[in-house]
Image: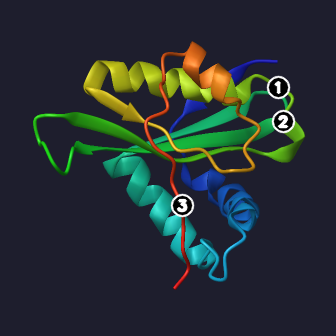
Amino acid sequence: MSIILRKPEEKDLSWLAKEFKIFSNYYYTKKSLYHSDAYTKALILRISEEQIFILAEDTEKGLMGWIVALAAPHLFNPDIKTTTLVSWWVSEEHRKSRVGYLLLKNLIKIAKENSDWFIVTVNVDSPVKKESLKNLGFSLVENQYLMEV
């Protein structure tokens, strides 16, 4: 078993759209994050060209998950280069593997090479432990809340 981290390709789009639909269910909101297969596929291609989209693939078992981030100057101080995590997902059958950790470590490497800050938000139901993030060098600086209006 060998895990490859790479950009998404056309051949991956159907799997990614299917998994994104599942990912969207974890938000428990009135309006789903998922729009349509066509929109999701176009979005994935655009993000992978303009931003950071890393896909994990097991050479024997297939696609496993992804991590997506935006790289941009900070809104309040453009001298601060940021990498902001947007989406981090490991398909259910691979959750007991190290693929989530590998994706995050790869994104940390990219952030360290290109940014001053790496901002991470995790879903309230995420299996990621706060202590694990602290051990990787993160510190808790704020909590995020959503109000549907």
Determine which residue is flagged by label 3. 145
Q: Nearer the viewer, mark 1 or mark 3?
A: 3
Q: Which colour assignment does the render follow?
A: rainbow
The answer to whether marks 2 and 1 mark residues whose Cβ atoms lie closer than 8 Å is: yes
The answer to whether marks 2 and 3 mark residues whose Cβ atoms lie closer than 8 Å is: no
Which quadrant of the figure contains the N terminus?
A: top right
Report the side of 136 relative to 108 (left or right): right
The answer to whether marks 1 and 3 mark residues whose Cβ atoms lie closer than 8 Å is: no
Q: Nearer the viewer, mark 2 or mark 3?
A: 3
- From the top left corner, tell me how far across and down residue 69 is, in percent: 43, 43
User: Is label 2 in a helix, a strand or a loop?
Assistant: helix
Q: Which residue: 75% across, 22% down?
A: 98
Q: Identify the amino acid type marked 2.
A: His
Whether residue 94 appears in this view of the structure is yes
- From the top left corner, tell me how far across and down residue 18 is, in percent: 74, 63
Q: Identify the amino acid type marked 1.
A: Ser
Report the side of 32 relative to 139 (left or right): right
- Residue 36, above or below 67: below
The Cα atoms of the two marked residues, 2 and 3, are separated by 28 Å
Q: Which mark is residue 94?
A: 2
Determine which residue is flagged by label 1. 97
Q: Which mark is residue 33?
A: none
- From the top left corner, tell me how far across and down residue 3 is, in percent: 70, 23
Question: Which quadrant of the view contains residue 55?
Answer: top right
How packed is label 1: few (under 14 Cα within 10 Å), some, or many (20 or more)?
few
User: Is label 1 in a helix, a strand or a loop?
Assistant: loop
Please report whichever mark, 2 or 3, sits nearer to the chain's N-terminal start. Answer: 2
How packed is label 3: few (under 14 Cα within 10 Å), some, or many (20 or more)?
few
